[in-house]
Image: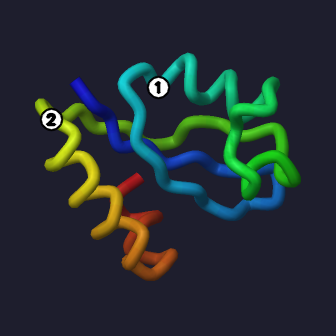
């Protein structure tokens, strides 16, 4: 299982990613060096959207699609 997730950062920006374990990944974004460079400077982050996919390929395609959306469209999804 893979998840596509959207985080809201402390500055109000949105970050989209994929993971096999969303809770662990959010902890990494907030607490460890394994978090993305983008989120390290914008802690704390909180999960605002998550959808499960059966394989990495589908999740990666959806992640890419979401990243290309304007902010307003992402907020509608959330």
At numbered mark 1, what does the secondary structure look like: helix, strand or loop?
Answer: helix
Residue 67 or residue 60, whichever sits in front: 60
Q: Which residue is drawn at 56% across and 36% down?
A: 47
Q: Residue 55: which disc?
A: 2
Q: In this view, does 24 lie above or below 55?
A: above
Q: Mark 1 to mark 2: distance in Å?
A: 15 Å
Q: Which residue is drawn at 40% across and 42% down?
A: 18
Sequence-earlier tag: 1 or 2: 1
Residue 57 in the image: x percent, y percent? 17, 48
At numbered mark 2, what does the secondary structure look like: helix, strand or loop?
Answer: loop
Number of numbered tags placed on the structure image: 2
Q: In this view, does 67 lie above or below 48?
A: below
Within 10 Å of the Cα at label 2, are there few (<14), some (14-19), or many (20+) other Cα atoms? few
Within 10 Å of the Cα at label 1, are there few (<14), some (14-19), or many (20+) other Cα atoms? some
Q: Mark 1 points at which residue?
A: 22
Residue 7 in the image: x percent, y percent? 58, 46
Q: Is residue 17 above or below residue 33?
A: below
């Amino acid at each position: 299982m893979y998840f596509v997730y959207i985080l809201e950062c402390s500055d109000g920006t949105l970050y989209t990613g994929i993971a096999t374990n969303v809770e662990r990944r959010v902890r990494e974004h907030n607490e460890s060096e394994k978090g993305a460079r983008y989120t390290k400077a914008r802690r704390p982050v909180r999960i605002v959207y998550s959808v499960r996919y059966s394989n990495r390929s589908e999740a990666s395609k959806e992640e890419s699609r979401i990243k290309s959306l304007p902010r307003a469209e992402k907020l509608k999804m959330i």
